[in-house]
């Protein structure tokens, strides 16, 4: 089977911008069911550049996060020893107005976001109780009412990124590893708040000389 034919088995559907999500879709009768395929998403600095695997991004759906802005995304689909790939038409665009929104929030010492805990330590959380995520200049804190569920100063063991498990709500969800052995998947009220929270926490962590990113990410300074 020729390379041109292979490359037309699948296509990417969705807006190639922060706040959206990308969905791999079969576009040929010859395409294998995605449930039977192995998928891996990658970041590329430029067309044909070195692939940087996005750890845990192995589903047909991926929601770009702030670290993806300005980068090309590519997904490799493997079935029966044959691998093909789909690539965004260009770099991921920033979300309109998000930068100004973050600049307005960054002047505060403590920023609050309403969230719902979707998972804790990889186990689904059935309660939809509203929690409050506090993002401060030195630490992050998750509260339920007046009680603190988790709080930790920015450290090298902390991780924060867009959720990578797929699903239509992925653009509103984030993965937060508070420290080794304690992690949450948090759903925000909007895509804008999810991305703003990630950007703010990374900015404050960077001021504390901590690169706050996702599992196995090679974060660029100031990202």
Image (spheres, rainbow, N blue to C red):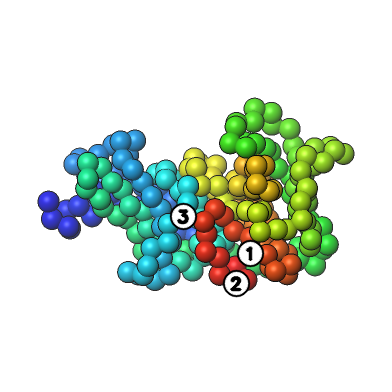
Instruction: Choose top left, top right, bottom left or bottom right for residue 66.
Output: bottom right
| CA distance for labels 3 and 2 | 18 Å
SS category of the residue bearing label 1: loop
Residue at position x 65%, y 46% in the image: 180
SS category of the residue bearing label 3: loop
Q: Of label 1 and label 2, which has the lower sequence position?
A: 1
**Circles 3 and 2 in contact, beta carbons < 8 Å:** no
Camera-side residue: 61 or 204? 204
The quarter of the picture where the C terminus appears is: bottom right
Which numbered circle lies on residue 2?
Answer: none
**Image height of 66 relative to 177, above or below:** below
Which numbered circle lies on residue 211?
Answer: 1
Residue linked to disc 2: 221
**Image height of 98 relative to 9, above or below:** below
Q: Can residue 18 be seen in this view?
A: no
SS category of the residue bearing label 2: loop
**Circles 1 and 3 in contact, beta carbons < 8 Å:** no
**Is residue 131 left or right of 8 when viewed as pictured?**
right
Label 2 environment density (alpha carbons within 10 Å; few <14, some 14–19, many ≥20): few
């Amino acid at each position: 089977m020729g390379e041109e034919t292979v490359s037309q088995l699948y296509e990417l559907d969705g807006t190639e911008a922060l706040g959206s999500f990308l969905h791999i879709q079969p576009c040929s009768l010859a395409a294998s069911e995605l449930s039977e395929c192995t998928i891996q998403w990658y970041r590329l600095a430029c067309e044909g550049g070195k692939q940087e695997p996005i750890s845990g991004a192995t589903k047909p759906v991926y929601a770009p996060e702030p670290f993806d802005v300005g980068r090309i995304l590519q997904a490799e689909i493997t079935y029966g020893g044959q691998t093909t790939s789909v690539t965004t038409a260009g770099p991921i665009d920033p979300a309109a107005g998000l930068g100004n929104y973050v600049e307005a929030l960054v002047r505060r010492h403590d920023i609050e976001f309403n969230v719902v805990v979707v998972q804790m330590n990889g186990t689904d959380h059935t309660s939809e109780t509203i929690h409050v995520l506090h993002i401060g200049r030195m630490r992050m804190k998750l509260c339920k009412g007046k009680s603190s569920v988790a709080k930790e100063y920015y450290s090298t063991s902390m991780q924060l990124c867009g959720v990578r498990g797929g699903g239509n709500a992925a653009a509103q969800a984030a993965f937060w590893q508070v420290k080794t052995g304690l992690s949450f998947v948090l759903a925000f009220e909007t895509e804008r708040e999810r991305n703003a929270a990630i950007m703010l926490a990374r900015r404050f962590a960077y001021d504390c000389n901590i690169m706050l990113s996702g599992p196995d990410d090679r974060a660029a300074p100031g990202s």
